[in-house]
Image (cartoon, rainbow, N blue to C red):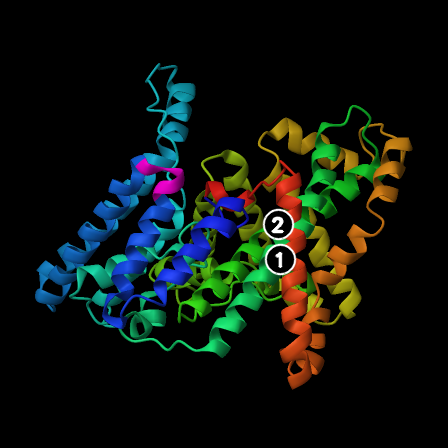
Amino acid sequence: MVFSSLEFLLRFLPAVLALYFIVPHKRKNLFLLAASLVFYAWGEPVYVGLMIASCIVNYFLGLAIDRHRGTAGAKAALVSAIVVNLALLATFKYADFLIENVNRLLGSAIASPGLPLPIGISFYTFQALSYTIDVYRRRAPVQRNLLTLATYIALFPQLVAGPIVRYPAIAGELEDRTHSIDLFAEGAYRFVLGLGKKVLIANNIGTIWSTATTTANPSVLLSWLGIVAFALQIYFDFSGYSDMAIGLGRMLGFHLPENFDFPYLSQSVSEFWRRWHMSLSQWFRDYVYIPLGGNRVVRARWIGNILIVWSLTGLWHGASWNFAAWGLYFGLLLLIERLFLGRLLGRLPRMVRHTYTMGIVLVSWVIFGLDSIAAISSYLGQLFGLRGVDLYNAEALYVLRSNAILLPIALLGAVPLARTFHARYVERAVFRAVAVPAFSVAVLTVSIAYLVDSTFNPFLYFRF
């Protein structure tokens, strides 16, 4: 079940919110855990046991780290936590990929297990890992209540697609959190904004990308429309989901971390990754890059650290070579920027820096969105007119005309115009009292109407 589904909006969420505020304070975590397991089981009941096992194993390993603090036993418990969590992820997400490539390399015929990918396993595994590592580093108190830790790992607002929440960030709120009408209203508004971004913008603009990648008559114009549309689709899809998660958290008394900061305004690749999927970038920085030595090592090892981290970042997104190539692509560009290009960029006009960055990012989405070298090569050739395609054709002009309103709306939505408007007007009492509720009801109504009438409701990050 995803947030942008009628089952969630009309059945699950109303029931959970109604019961949550009736349940006594001391039982709220128990109720949230039960609701989260139901949410997870709705789509994949077979893997609820896997989720519960992850909670139990990390709970006892956290206790072992604390009990044997300062001894080899604590390190052994930490290593066990890392091995167990990564083995879980490797088995279900990467086993088929590894076996397929071993068979291709050795000419063997090892049977692939064909295990379905558990929903959100990359997110909740990283959360569980961060808990045990932070307990070992003394950056988080050990949680002695299994129910509380399980609520943290399984919490449904961020379960499927993040943001990746560090345990210290919400440890206090797991024990005692504040609920208020203002906080609930703030969360509801944020949730509806995210729903509108996902359903009304991402779903509709995604059809341009589908057309550009399946057309029998490609052109330069249609190819550029397609990749710009995909860039906007993945942004509104994922940031919309993060907005919904953050909004749900607010409604339930949690302050989940921000995950996006208008990344398409970036002036460099480094800045882009400080603004895009921030919880993932920070996770790899703190739990992989810095432990490897970060930039406090000789240059050759530092280069190796960058490439390792970005290879892993790419593969985290999916068990496919295009994701590995996507990660390495960014790793190499970040190295180039840090070695010399960053200083040169700093001397150039903002427009030039922004054009450079968006060009790099758009090419990256071709690698991310297509799963074969042939398809990637062909699409890149079409973008730059190297495949003998026309500059434009009737189909490209039709797509452009059909989306003449949607494309500008999406482009404006990817910049802080709405945030500026919010800060200037929405904070006024009259807007909070009248305009915000009216706008929220309108967006919610139109989104539900769209979902009732449409069968096209993909969620790009659902597979991660």
Is 332 left, or right, of 415 in this rendering?
A: left
Q: From what the image shows, is residue 182 above or below residue 9? A: below
| Element under disc 1 | helix
Q: Position of residue 148 (x, y in %)?
A: 24, 63
Q: Which residue is mark 1?
A: 444
Give, as a three-letter code, the residue at label 2: Ile
**Quadrant (top left, top right, bottom left, bottom right) of the C terminus:** top left
Q: Residue 276 at what x, y percent from top left?
A: 57, 59
In percent of the image, x 37 and y 57: which residue is there? 288
Tell me the CA gap for discs 2 and 1.
6 Å
Whether residue 300 is visible here, answered yes or no, is no
Mark 2 surroundings: few (<14), some (14-19) or many (≥20) residues within 10 A: many
Q: Are marks 2 and 1 in contact (CB under 8 Å)?
A: yes
Taking 445 as reference, is 217 left or right? right
Give the magenta range. 41-45
Residue 344 in the image, given as x and y percentages of width and height: 70, 67
Label ID, residue 448? 2
Q: Residue at x 78, y 51 (%)?
A: 406
